[in-house]
Amino acid sequence: MPNRPLSAIAGALLCLATAASCRGGPTAAAANCDAPGVTRNEVRVGLIYPDSGVFARTFTPTRAGIDARLGAVNAAGGVNGRKITYDWEDDQGRLDTNGVVARDLIETKNVFAIMEASPVSTGSADYLANLNVPVAGLAVEPAWSQHRNMFTVQYTSSAVDPRQSVTTFGKFVREQGGTRALMVLDPAGLGLTKTIAKQVQASLQSAGIPFTTAEADETPTAAQLDRIAQKLLSGGIDTLVSPMTIEGFAQIVAGTRQRGAQPKVILSGSQTVNGNLLRTYGAQLAGLTTYAARSVDPRDPAIAAYQANLTRYSPELQVQGDTLARIGYMTADMIVRGLQEAGPCPTRASFVSGLRAVKGYTAEGLTPAVDFDQDFGKLTACYPFIRVNAAGTGVETISDNYCGERITS
């Protein structure tokens, strides 16, 4: 996957003072249109995310990112003279509720498109696909690689055919000196962690790295931490890997180190370690490496523009480096770009066909380039690898674009 193009960086610099995108302004006079949610002055979309339930704490920052991106584009005049507004619904992280609230947004609130920041978007995927409603968001389920009305900047392991994998993770572990791995799984992880685990295991096998498994709850018990530490200490295991959330895995890393285990390689497929975790665990997380998102470097013009918009439009967000906030920002940016591609009188069909044809999409420099057509439904082979520094005071970039190859078993 190519690196961010220089043109996107230049564009972010030009727009830094007012917004993260220059393309959001009133490029044409607003027309009277009859698509759902579209008026002369507004396009109304919907947001579905778990505002309550077990996933609420994890996904809440996505809304701050959405507010920042839409705040910026609306301040610049909207798209074709229309401001983008949204109604939101709480799906509680439940499949059935996700379907119910999606119907409410479409049939009662008459929204044009949907932003999904939820781990259970399968609950509404077929319904929205049948109506060709544009959907943008976080792809953590297979539905995202099955419906072409659904757009994402990256397919997670759980969103693609489980037979897909990449050599990337095994290659990385081997290069970091890992020779034998322990993978920690959460038995209550909605089935998503098991899918991710199989793909990471295939990647380890491609590099000739044997592995064993252990189980732990999202909030691990002392007994679970004892068992994990014992396996690390007695089994000749030098690598600790997990698809759990970063909050849960951080507890495991810190807890096993307190028990004397010192794995050489620690790899998580969750979001980047945030400031709250660093303040809580410090050097106990040293070396913990993630590959879900790029690091937040304020010297990067795209990151500087993103952070400026967060500060201006979402000041309530405590941790600007939160990966889910960036995902929310990029989700809203896909809505903006789709409306730009749909023209002055957007329809759902013109949005879907227009955005699907976009190549080299970078969300104003926040993600490696995406070809929405050619990359549809394919597991990403290149990732940014970011680790906690030795002092446990921050993160450092090992590689911004570390690549392997796609493999199918």
Image (spheres, helix red, strand yellow):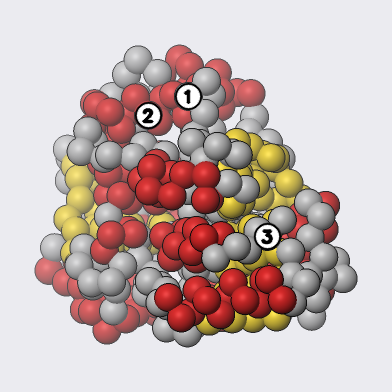
Amino acid type, callout 1:
Pro
In this view, which residue lies farthest toward the right?
Answer: 208
The CA span between labels 1 and 2 is 8 Å
Q: Position of residue 162 (x, y in %)?
A: 65, 79
Side (left or right) of 45 relative to 292: left
- Decide: is 309 above or below 44: above
- Report helix, strand or loop for mark 3: loop
Looking at the image, is mark 1 or mark 3 nearer the viewer?
A: 3
Could you classify mark 1 by the number of other residues whose Cα lies within 10 Å: few (under 14), some (14-19), or many (20 or more)? few
Quarter holding residue 409: bottom right
Question: What residue is pinned by disc 1?
Answer: 298
Side (left or right) of 233 relative to 316: right
Q: Position of residue 170 (x, y in %)?
A: 78, 63
Side (left or right) of 203 relative to 274: right
Q: Tell me if I can see residue 185 in this picture.
A: no
Question: What residue is pinned by disc 2?
Answer: 307
- Decide: is 402 above or below 9: below
* Residue pictured at 48% horizontal, 36% vertical: 393
Q: Which badge, 1 or 3, is on the more N-terminal residue?
A: 3
The CA span between labels 2 and 3 is 34 Å
Q: Tell me if I can see residue 290 in this picture.
A: yes
Q: Are marks 1 and 2 in contact (CB under 8 Å)?
A: yes
Q: Residue 263: give its label.
A: 3
